[in-house]
Amino acid sequence: MEGSRVSPFVKRVSLKRLLLSALVAFLALIGAYFLLIRPWHLTWGATDEEVRRPMPGDGIHANPSFNGTRAVSVEAGPEHIWPWLVQMGYRRAGFYSYDRLDNDGIPSADQIISEYQSLKVGDRVPMAESAYADYRAVALTLPLKRSLASRKQRMEAALRQYELAAGYQIAGVTTAATYRTADIYLQMGNALLESERPANLSGEALAEYDLLLEEQAYPFEEQAIALHETNIGRMNNGLYDEWIEQSLAQLAELVPARYAKQERSVAYVETIH
Amino acid sequence: MWKQYINRHCRSLLTVLVTLWLVAGCAATQESRLAAQPETPTPAVEESYRQALDMMQASQWPEARQRLEDLTAAHPGLAGPWLNLGIVYTRLGEPEAAEAAFRRSIENNPANPVAYNQLGIFYRRTDRLEAARETYGAALGVAPDDPDTHWNLGVLHDVYLPDTQLALFHFERYQQLTGSDDPQLAAWINTLKAARAPVDNVTAVVKP
């Protein structure tokens, strides 16, 4: 009788202990994760020097939601690595990693895919399926002030990406970035010109509103022209690639008086002799 | 007798040497004559060249460069691979190599105006305007009726080395040679015609 009274007490104590130790173990695991595992995971493969070293793009985002430096050493020159890097992305070439986890189970590419080699502003490089809103998708509607702010923000984000790309100094990337940056400015100007007009305006008032818009759009066009000119200025160094070619075509449209007169050139010759 | 023996043998040795030298000389002249003749590419070379052209059309510049460098190394006497290699070098931003390749192409086939024009455009873009003018001039020397050369000279004299008369002459030649009805070209020609005789215009305004 006495023993039966004692035993539930003993049992209750051991249950409490069990719960307590489980809690302690759980907390210890969480602590271990944040103190040991997560730092290791966020710097996977990188040396301490690499973790401390400033990386291109560090300043782009003031409050990133994720910040990690992971490294894989590949014994090859940058010019051989770049084609593989530039094609990365969800449902693009994949991430050469755990495809089931990262790429919807689609195997990552095992070759260089020419369609993904020329990355330009506005191209999507998804990390995952996401509601990615192209900055171009923001049409300027009324109230202009609000839609303009939103579009400007997206434009600036895209511009920062291209500033970064231009800094890489890889032939073709710099000219592409310059072309695309110019294009972003031009589209900003065009979006202003095509923006929704207030319904209550007509006649002279509307004409005046149009004039104001043109004044607003003009600096963007100027900026675009200056950038395209920078790009074609690279011809003086003997470079002539598809982006310079496209900048020339744009200039021929924007400033026909100066740039429409272009030499007749050939892309290749058939004859072997 | 020994003397005679040595003499005779020396003479025959000399004869042998002279004969060898003559034969070698003949072989050398034959060799250089062969090199001077245009090379006839084998089907394999032509196939390789065609693949290089496909790479160029697909904008695969590094691959095309490799292929054309191989072709020009193995068959330096062909003009086409050099010309295309020059275009590829320009695309890859290697001006010195591009210029050298265009020049090699012209050396190998001085009759192709396209090579002169590529070199001329290259000079114009790298701001060597006088060299561009001379090179286009050389193109007209071998092909006086090549429309593109006239067009390029028109552009050169209209924009970069301004000479209204010359620009007008070459644009009009281009128009005649191609029968072009491009309204933009017609507008340029009209503008040049108006600019050519500013004095006449002024007198025309002043007279009445």
Image (cartoon, grey):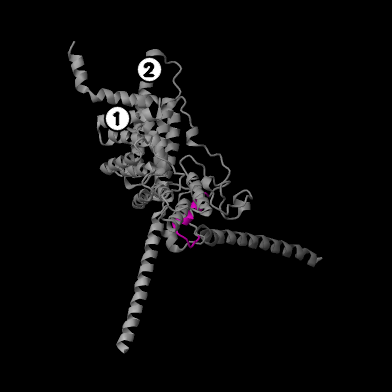
Q: Which residues are magenta?
A: A72-87
**Left or right of A237 in this view: A87:** right
Q: Is residue B65 visible?
A: yes
Where does the image place residue A216, in percent across and percent down from the top left? Answer: 36, 27
> What kind of element bears circle 1?
helix
Where does the image place residue B32, in percent across and percent down from the top left? Answer: 38, 59
Q: Amino acid at mark 2?
A: Ala
Mark 1 closeness class: few <14, some 14–19, many ≥20 residues within 10 Å = some
> Is residue A92 magenta-colored?
no
Q: Residue at x 46, y 41 (%)?
A: A121
Q: Nearer the viewer, mark 2 or mark 1?
A: 1
Mark 2 closeness class: few <14, some 14–19, many ≥20 residues within 10 Å = few
Mark 2 → mark 1, Cα distance in angstroms:
45 Å
Q: Which residue is mark 1?
A: B169
Q: Which residue is mark 2?
A: A207
Q: Residue at x 44, y 60 (%)?
A: A50
Toward the viewer: A4 or B75?
A: B75
Q: Chain of mark 1?
A: B
Q: Is residue B104 above or below residue B177?
A: below
Q: Chain of mark 2?
A: A
**Left or right of B49 in this view: B105:** left
Q: Is residue A66 visible?
A: no
Residue B162 sits in quarter: top left
Q: Are marks 2 and 1 in contact (CB under 8 Å)?
A: no
Residue B160 sits in quarter: top left
Looking at the rendered structure, the number of numbered marks drawn on it comes to 2
Q: Amino acid at mark 1?
A: Phe
> Is residue A86 magenta-colored?
yes
Toward the viewer: B17 or B52?
A: B17
> What kind of element bears circle 2?
helix
Q: Is residue A44 above or below residue A92?
A: below
